Amino acid sequence: MDNENVRLFYWDVRAPPAKFQYRPAPTERPMLITKEVLGEQAINSKVRDMRIQCDRYEWIIDIKRKKNDIITLDQVFQTIYDYLYMTLTESEWNELSAGEKRNAHISRGIRITHSPVGFDMDGRIRRVDVLGERTVFSGLRHEEATEEWIMILASRGRNT
């Protein structure tokens, strides 16, 4: 899941995993990920659980493998997506700088504006709002000392 040289995939974590795009080869056009690919094994089958930490925040995402099952790419991406769309806790809010709080409000406004949901939409700030422009999933880096995976996020640029 590491892409240090060439970006062969693109996923803006503001969108569901079904919008994950990848290139089968560097010269080919990007395509949406298929259900077959999402169903593939994400990590070694000997690993029972997977713990992911966000690269900038102390957010811990735990993925539990069901008995006699594997952890799939779909589980990993969907769990990340679901976690980032959880409402920010008060303690998480209190840890943010004034600039991060301002940016979270701006991102929330953009998210609400582009949402297809109607008038009664829940307008609370979510973790994904705190990320600002850093919403491009760039892979997971394994930390052998802690057995955790670090989620690397990159900036999406100004026009996306």
Image (spheres, rainbow, N blue to C red):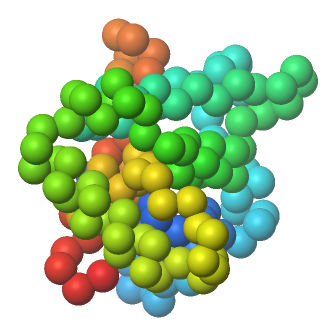
Question: In the image, is residue 71 above or below residue 85?
Answer: above
- Picture quadrant where residue 103 is located: bottom left
Q: Nearer the viewer, residue 87 or 29?
A: 87
Which residue of the protein is positioned furthest toward the top in this rendering?
A: 145
Residue 14 in view: yes
Total labels: the figure holds: 0
Residue 147: x percent and y percent?
45, 16
Residue in the picture at 50% in, 44% down: 87
To which quarter of the image does residue 119 belong? bottom right
- Residue name at image x 78 percent, y 64 percent: 36
- Residue 35 in the figure: left or right of residue 30: right
Viewer-closest of 33 and 62: 62
Residue 63 in percent (x, y) is at: 64, 29
**Horizontal and vertical percent for residue 39?**
76, 54
Q: Which residue lies furthest to the front in this view?
A: 120
Residue at left offset 30%, top offset 82%: 160
Of 115 and 38, the residue lying toward us: 115
1 relative to 62, above or below: below
**Residue at far bottom of view:** 29
Q: Looking at the image, which residue is at 44% across and 21% down?
A: 148
Q: Residue 60, image x and y in percent? A: 46, 26
Q: Among all residues in the image, which is located at the extreme right?
A: 68
Image position of 96 (left or right of 47)? left
Q: Between 43 and 153, which is closer to the camera in this rendering?
A: 153
Taking the image as shown, residue 87 lies to the left or right of residue 145, namely: right
Q: Can residue 23 be seen in this view?
A: no
Q: In this view, does 153 lie to the left or right of 71?
A: left
